[in-house]
Image (cartoon, rainbow, N blue to C red):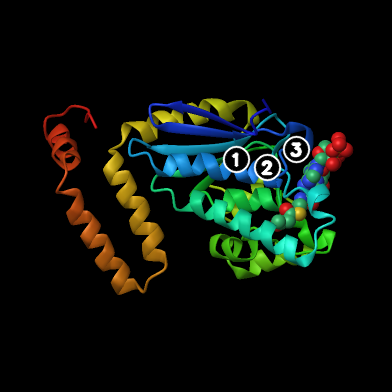
Amino acid sequence: MSEKLIEVVDSAGIVRLTISRPKALNALNSDVLAELDSVLSDLEARDNLRAVLITGAGEKAFVAGADIAEMREKSPEQARDFARQALRTLKRLETLPVPTVALVNGFCLGGGCELALACDWAVASDNAIFGQPEVLLGVIPGFGGTQRLPRRVGPAMALDLCTTGRKIDAGEALRIGLVNRVMPQAELEAYAEELARQLGGNGPQSVRAAKQAIHDGMDQDLDSALALETALFAFCFAGEEQTEGMSAFVEKRKPNF
Ligand code: CAA
């Protein structure tokens, strides 16, 4: 049997995915994308899912990009199909109903940066390096980078990164809002565990509602988005979580979600 390219570890609904092709710095080829797609499709069907953390195997790279060796000989039609395959998979990741977090443990370039951008937020180790270096290879980002990067960091910074192809360190990534937090690489593992505990301890229905309000609201005008928030806020009062959460506060105990 061929080795798995995506390792899946599930701990009480907190699922950790590790892209595992360390010899190629976890570069995304069509096999990795197909396996990721299949894993995500299984996760979509689960109602006890609480959060998804995604990282790269080894200490050197999160993902060093789309696989250049595989792309090298592609025709325009094959390149379009490859990009579409990746876009479909990253859309699946983006639209999972639970929080998704990229744990960026090293090089996060090209398609790797685009993978991180399809997650709700990102945490980086202090040795992480980010960039959209596609122009150095004679192409542009093809896995959503020209669209998700400006939405995350603003169009001027996205243009800077996509037209110079320059690489930035974790500190600059934090400053421009590409990542939420930077920490020593040795602490990333402990942080992942703490995050899993934190997300696992919160009310699953309200966490999903918060994600839905932010994601769906971003695509709407403010009044419609505020109406969506009101609807989801009211919806929270229809479940047991609100009763438990507020009763626990009043009774000075921890909620049991
Ligand atoms: N695709 C395929 N293989 C890759 C790869 C990639 N994106 N990145 C690294 N590798 C492979 C290398 O070819 C090398 O393999 P061999 O040992 O068989 O030669 C192995 O991983 C280790 O890499 P290096 O020897 O290059 O390691 P390094 O420490 O000297 O450099 C690096 C690390 C700076 C990340 C360098 O590997 C690099 O520049 N990689 C390419 C980064 C890049 O350009 N990414 C964008 C790809 S295009 C893209 O993603 C388009 C898109 O949007 C769809």
Residue 219 is situated, as x and y percent measured from the top left of the image, at 42, 68
Q: Quadrant of the N terminus?
A: top right
Residue 101 is situated, as x and y percent measured from the top left of the image, at 50, 42
Q: Quadrant of ligand 1?
A: top right
Q: Earlier in the sequence, mark 3 or mark 1?
A: 3
The answer to whether mark 3 and mark 2 are in CB contact below 8 A is no
Q: CA distance from mark 3 to mark 1?
A: 17 Å
Dot 1 corresponds to which residue? 35
Q: Can you see residue 99? A: yes
Total numbered labels:
3
Whether residue 252 sits left or right of residue 191 in the image: it is left
Quarter assignment of residue 124:
top right
Vertical order, 84 against 254 (above or below): below
Q: CA distance from mark 2 to mark 1?
A: 6 Å
Q: In the drawing, what numbered circle is on residue 31?
A: 2
Question: Quick one: SS at disc 3?
Answer: loop
Dot 3 corresponds to which residue? 25
